[in-house]
Image: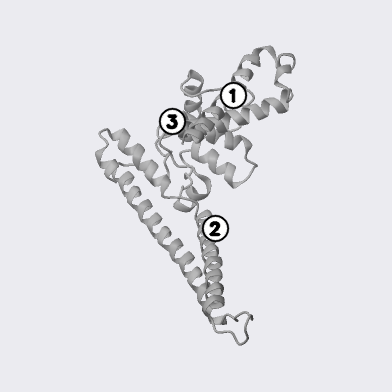
Amino acid sequence: MEELRSTPSRGGEISVAWEGLAASCASPVRRLGGFLLVGFALFAASTTAVILYYNLFGERSFAGQGVAVPHAAFYATMALSAAVAAGGYLVWLLRSLRSYAAFSRILSGRGLDPRRPTRDGLSAYSDEQLLALRTRYERALPGPAKERLARTFGFHEDDSFSLGPLSARPGTFEMGVLRMEWEARLILRSGEPLPEISWWTEGRHRLLPRKPTELRRLLFALRYTTESVRELKRRYGYRVERWHKTVPEGRLWDAIRDHEEARRIQAALNSRRISG
């Protein structure tokens, strides 16, 4: 919150608010799994400690014989582990919902709809995130998830986006044309209600705008360049050195560009992991 108050520009404030809202929506299922794992680890450690304690300090009926651990001790460690897992999850859940509500109020105070970030267009989204989302739409099977992407962002099968090779890159004229197409689609369908991106939906699908840090741009770019290279290999063969024979002449340069860019991004991310 302090970071939000100290940001000088309104655009920066809104970007931080969207980031905070999205960060409040970690997957509840994954979090539950994490806390259950913590509870299980605590149960295993506690049970081992109880067994060792009774074998070291418990009374033996006969010399050299092991000590029977009371059932109540196992039940106590089980209850403690379950309480830690459930309590930790509930604390996280309450903090997450409170943070989500706080950032929602900030965005609402700026005249924005925290549950419908594309109500007024796509300006809150970076080019990289939009391309990553459009790639997800391209790969999604027909169903509610694909329709949600289409209705939320204006994606459709007949827009000028394509993979293998990529038809647009961030910051280019082609990307600007794509934005115009998608926003025009949103305007044409403005009579239909936009789907809400709730706390639960964001935790499962990650659709809210994210602050375009350098690392996040790389991660988004890796998604769509990797998918483009996969499509190129599916169409023109897995041996890149033979693409000059299989890729149409007008697409060869773009195909090589996508392949090299995917390798460069992966190398940059690997370098960050090593240095980090």
The mark that comes first in sequence, 1 or 2, is 2
Name the disc covering residue 166, or none: 1
Instruction: Residue under label 2, please give it.
Output: 33
- Label 2: how many Cα within 10 Å (few below 14, some 14–19, many 20+): few
Kindly report the distance in space between the C-alpha atoms of the residues bearing marks 1 and 2. Answer: 37 Å
Is there a contact, CB below 8 Å, between mark 2 and mark 3?
no
Of labels 1 and 3, the one closer to you = 3
* Residue 214, numbered label: 3
Precedes in sequence: disc 2 or disc 3: 2
Question: How busy is the neighbourhood of tag 1: few (under 14 within 10 Å), some, or many (20 plus)?
Answer: many
Identity, as a three-letter code, of the amino acid under mark 3? Glu
> Dot 2: what SS?
helix
Question: Mark 1 is on which residue type?
Answer: Leu
Contact, mark 1 vs mark 3 (Cβ under 8 Å): no
Task: Estimate the spatial distance between the alpha carbons at disc 1 and disc 3, rounded to whole Å.
Answer: 21 Å
Quarter of the image where one finds residue 248:
top right
| Image side of residue 226 versus residue 218, left or right | right
Q: Nearer the viewer, residue 117 or 275?
A: 275
Q: Residue furthest front?
A: 63
Callout 3 secondary element: helix
Q: How far across and how far down the image is residue 224, in percent?
A: 57, 30
